[in-house]
Amino acid sequence: MQYRMLVGFLACAATGAFCTSAAAEPLRVYETQRISGSPPRIDGHIDEAVWDQVSWAGDFTQREPYPGQPPTEQTQFKILYDDDALYLAYRAFDSQPDKIVALSARRDYFPGDWVEVNIDSNHDRRTAFSFTSSVSGVKGDEFVSEDGNNWDGNWDPIWFLATAIDSEGWTAEVKIPLSQLRFGNEPEQVWGIEITRRIFRQEERSNWQFIPRDATGWVSGFGELRGLRDLRPRRQVELLPYAVTRAESFAKQDGNPFATGSDQAVAFGLDGKIGLTSDLTLDLTANPDFGQVEADPSEVNLSAFETFFDEKRPFFIEGSSILDFPLAPAVTGGSFTQDNLFYSRRIGRAPQGFASTADGEYSDSPDHSSILGAAKMSGKTSRGWSIGVLEAVTAEENADIDGVHGKREQVVEPATNYFVGRVQRDYDHGQTAVGGMFTAVNRRTNDAAVDFLHTAAYTGGLDVRHDWHDRTYFVAANLDASHIRGSREAILRTQTASARYYQRPDADYVSVDSTRTSLSGGAGAVRFGKQSRGHVRFETGVAWRTPGFETNDLGYLRRADEINQFGWGNYRIETPFSIFRRLAFNVNEWVNYDFGGTHLSNSANTNFNANFLNNYQCGGGLTRDFAYVSNTELRGGPSSRWPGGWNPNYWVNSDSRRKIYYGFGGSWYIGDDDFYWSRDEWVDLTVRPNNQIRVTLSPSHSKNRPELQYVGRRQFEGQDRYLFASLDQETVALTLRLDYAVTPDLTIQYYGAPFVSAGEYRDFKRITDPRADHYEDRFVTLSDQEISRDEASDSYEVDEDRDGTADYGFGNPDFNYREFNSNLVARWEFSPGSSLYLVWSQGRVDFTSDGHFSARDGVDELFHRHPHDIFLVKVSRWFSL
């Protein structure tokens, strides 16, 4: 019944029953001129005669909160250019200049009042360069792609800004070097352009070229900048050499030659940016250093699957959108959400091998693979070709081993070459896009210690998307393939990995072949939806992964062997009414099968989010998971049936314009038959004591109570025994962030995150009939006569046949994990593009097999552990040739 209702809703939306078609806005054009004489001095005061060459443009229209209405304060701008740069002047009128909010912050935080220009210099109606000028002098810059669906804030061009406040409001002057933009070589050019202003105290935004909130895109709705004649693209050559000195302090261990208590190092490297053509750029890095990047959030992962962590390293996140190739949209839900052909954290990853040591030996392994060099070419040509190519080489990594048998080395990660290539072609002003991607990993696995890794891994994909009816509707598809090669051990390891579990005894459509030295697979997705115009949006489709599909050498794949049908419907109101600024409702549904035809799962969700006139926000949702079949819970064993459950959630955010604002929320999972229960709650509290300092405190707490948590697999009388237990897990975490912007070019940031998680296992169980109709018939609980704990060895023994002799055993699975990560970074941009970093990082880790939870005792124990401190000084100097 639920699916028929959803299909009916989508059908009504597709036929336009809930759709209102907005008339296209009249195109606005600004006519600029080449500067005759000297360019303006960038000081924030628009008082030089050169600005009189062009007239003011204005007459902005409000976009938020009241679309189409006049703004509370008007804005004007002028644009000039010469052979070197584009120059902009802003006049932001304000009848109450004493209420202008000049918040200071680090770059790309977009604080307080600001004016922003978006420049589509390729005039492809899909991509743009964004430059945001805060009244406080803080810069923000982003690369916009996918017609406004992707904003990359990690793009950091060189440009200049100065602002001033006067009796009429505030003014700004901007200089954008042409070398930072991409454009063709036509004698007379037309660029897309949009100017947006934010009035912080009103939470109001207005546009020069009005673009409704329900418009079909962003960049495609820009006005035009004309009058650009005889522009010659500047050949961009930028070099950024750096030097870094590093000192470490850690616990000293007697007898361990590697744990001496301290270490020092000095390193040098080079980053570069070269304009190969007017629209293609080559980024280079040699021996990169990412010491200023903060650590990943702490976690205890009790699943069989790898956690997805966001990329934080500047070289890999700047301009990364061109190399993005998701295997399915986020609305697929479940295990498909993060799947991608390219996951940049594979490059420079922690070594995958381990040192083999004997008694009396110590080892020292690197915590990451060294990137010898990397190059990335990206851009978009005047003919609509988007191009992205990345090549990286990592070094062979060795663990140093020392002890009673002397000194030696063992390879823990082979030398590896990574390649990613992505092309996409736009047609019909970006309404159709066709593209492809290819990735390759080649390893030198000559040493037997790393023979378990693939020697080669290749993936490829083709994607197409077409929009029609003024970009209101779309259809998209992608087809993907993978091929891996390696030793028998490597391919056997892949066949039996958690992504596919070929060894499942009831999987008659796949089988383990221990003689294989290669494996291939495919994937794909087809989807159709309505993305804009009116109150209703929707998307539906199907995605799949064949059992042999594998991308984890350079991509991210959580699970293969699945077919996923999904649907999403959305009803939204974008115009303020009653107490609301905006209001939206969503419905979702998911159905999963495996390639053996087994119906794995059904889920449905409904949720809402509301923005109020007072700038508060709230939302909530409810997900229903119906009883399901899992191919992974027994971790290589047969498939198993599991009860369903209910998952409600909620969240509330206060007005972020206030000096003190907060958010809080929570979620529960209530499993049928009491098989699972969990609760999570979180709070965010931000205090802004003045315009330069911001402090955020984010505590969270969770409880996890599964009745069947995997413990391990053992054998008895030639048969597998799948052992589970009830788990009482409790976790508390806290994140503290302090941002102090001394000036827009001098910032101090602190990040600290203590984490405590403890889990205690009880009521151990053995799976007896994993597909039984009734939940209670799928397992038996081991009695006191069958299981006993050996305190001396901190392990359990199982006497299944009760003959007085242990038949098998396992270690105590209880855990108490504590971790503290902190990072203090002072950054001074002493000249455009050149920076000095002072960094102090500290890490503390503690683990015991005591599953008793106590947040106070856990933190106390943690801070009695000897810290691992890293002190780093890094200086980089920007040169433009």
Image (cartoon, rainbow, N blue to C red):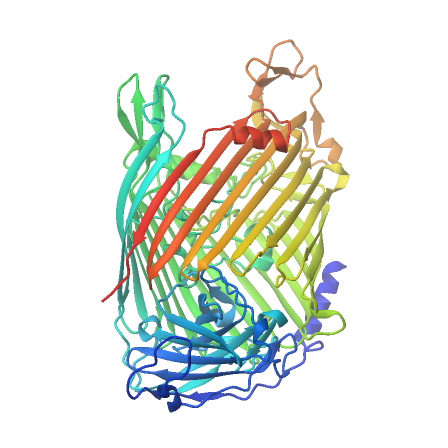
Percent position of residue 293, x then y? 42, 48
Quarter of the image with the C terminus in it: bottom left
Q: Image height check: is 234 above or below 719? A: below
Q: Which one is in front, 417 or 524?
A: 417
Q: Nearer the viewer, residue 219 or 577?
A: 577
Residue 119 screen position, x and y as percent: 43, 76
Quadrant assignment for the N terminus? bottom right
Q: Residue at x 40, y 84 (%)?
A: 47
Depth check, front residue: 788 or 680: 680
**Is 689 on the left or on the right of 580, as rendered?**
left
Left or right: 181, with 800 as reference point: left
- Does residue 301 appear in the picture of this structure? no
Question: Can residue 532 be seen in the rendering of this structure?
Answer: yes
Q: Residue at x 26, y 48 (%)?
A: 268
- The residue closer to the viewer here, 429 or 717, is 429
Q: What residue do we see at 32% from left, 41% from top? A: 246
Which residue shows up at 37% across the image and 48% down it? 838
Quarter residue 262 falls in: top left
Q: Position of residue 190 (x, y in %)?
A: 39, 85
Residue sticking out furthest to the left: 881
Indicate whether 205 appears above or below 770. below
Residue 297 in picture, x, y percent from top left: 52, 44
